[in-house]
Amino acid sequence: MIDSSKNIRPGDILRKKRFGGELTETEIRAFVRGVVDGSFADYQISALLMAICIHGMSDRETLALTLEMARSGEMLDLSRIPGIKADKHSTGGVGDTTSLILVPLVACCGVRMAKMSGRGLGFTGGTLDKMESIPGMRVDLDVDAFERQVTDIGCAIIGQTAELAPADKVLYALRDVTETVDCMPLVVSSILSKKLAAGCDVVVLDVKTGSGAIMQTLEDSRKLAQMMVRIGNLSGKKFSAVITDMDQPLGNYIGNALEVEEAIDVLAGRTAGDLKDVSLQLGAHILKGAGAVSSIAEGVEMLDGKIASGEGLRKFAAMIRAQGGDPRVAEDTSLLPKAKSTVELRADEPGYLAAIRTDDVGNAAKLLGAGRERKTDAIDPAVGIVMHRRVGDKVRRGDLLATMHVGERSDRIGAYNLLRRAIRIGTAPVPRPTLIHDVIEA
């Protein structure tokens, strides 16, 4: 069959979208091929990204772009792994360690978690950076080893292969410098193309909303979630989304080794709160999507039972061992990297913790060395912040609000000032923030 997309010139596509036209599947195929093989120049790609940002894309265009980006590289076939394979994706937040909790828990319930994750750019490290703070942990398994581990143990968390959705790597880099990062069709195609290429049957999306999220209003977060679920299900996979709050850090620990420690505390049954609640909700949606339970309440109860029995923590230790890490951290978190010193932030006045600017907390953690500005930046796994109060808490003058874990290269003054600015104390009581704002299903 002759590929007619090879006869389409970049200028034809640019002109059509510039005036708000709907691109055909053939035109989108030509565009994605040009992105990957270099026949489209960066300035032509950037111009089309801006035209898409201005005029938007129909569902048909967005689906076509998503599928072509997924097909631009390796498409994993996980059919050799028995049973339902599931994945989870978060749009990113602060203190968001749900993957480390729900992956082993869901695996204990018989649904295999074949999770490919990325590294963090911005506030703190991504899931891979958190995993690598565990001594000896490897996240660079090849596909065969990944499939064997998911088959044998039920779960694995590894880095995305270089061959997975290569078009997205080019487009994301250009979106970052052309102020088109938050364009919804581009966000949707970026996220979903990688998930479709990774080959799972069921995917649950954790769409954040609030001051620490890519979409800071509930309206925009809901639109994004609805579009991702709609396009994801049109692709033939089973997608759902949970819109969760990011108007304060999800967990109390922010930083790489610190977040691993909190995840272990949740799995060990020592810690409750928002991080655990969101992890159980997301895990329950995976179980329901996979047909393992008939309701979310049943799923939450099943997952909570895996914490109470100790199975979840043992599964986490087994995953660590299989990927070369030291499984003893599951029982002894003192084996994780520790910062050399700490700095305390205390309340100047009594009142109620009225608000937390999550993005400021995240940027404070980045100044300490927990995150990166560029992909080549090194992360200090030991540094970060522990929050001691949540929005709505009553505080007295001198109460401990947060503790910074500081390293030799940390900008402790800049981080301290940002952290102080992030926390607002008021005189009147305030309600606890809503944790789960909405659920979007097919």
Image (tube, grey):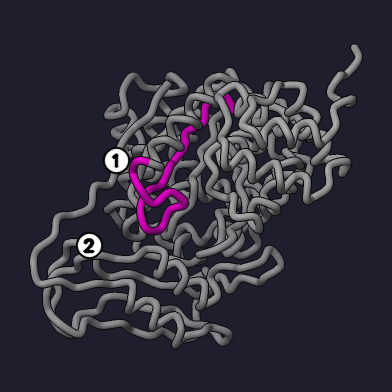
* Circles 1 and 2: CB atoms closer than 8 Å: no
Range of magenta residues: 199-219
Residue type at the position of mark 2: Val
Q: Quadrant of the N terminus?
A: top right
Residue 391 is marked as 2
Residue 178 lies, in percent from the top left, at: 65, 55
Question: Which quarter of the picture shows residue 115?
Answer: top right
Residue 299 lies, in percent from the top left, at: 34, 30
Rendered position, 299 above or below 352: above
**Dot 1, crowdedness within 10 Å: few (<14), some or many (≥20)?**
some
**Dot 2, crowdedness within 10 Å: few (<14), some or many (≥20)?**
many
Rendered position, 171 above or below 385: above
Give whichever of 9, 1 is nearer the camera.
9
Residue 406 lies, in percent from the top left, at: 48, 82
Q: Residue at x 85, y 27 (%)?
A: 8
Residue type at the position of mark 1: His
Question: Which quarter of the picture shows residue 122?
Answer: bottom right
SS at circle 2: loop
Q: Residue at x 52, y 69 (%)?
A: 336
Residue 437 is marked as 1
Q: Is residue 152 visible?
A: no
CA–CA distance in space, label 1 to label 2: 17 Å
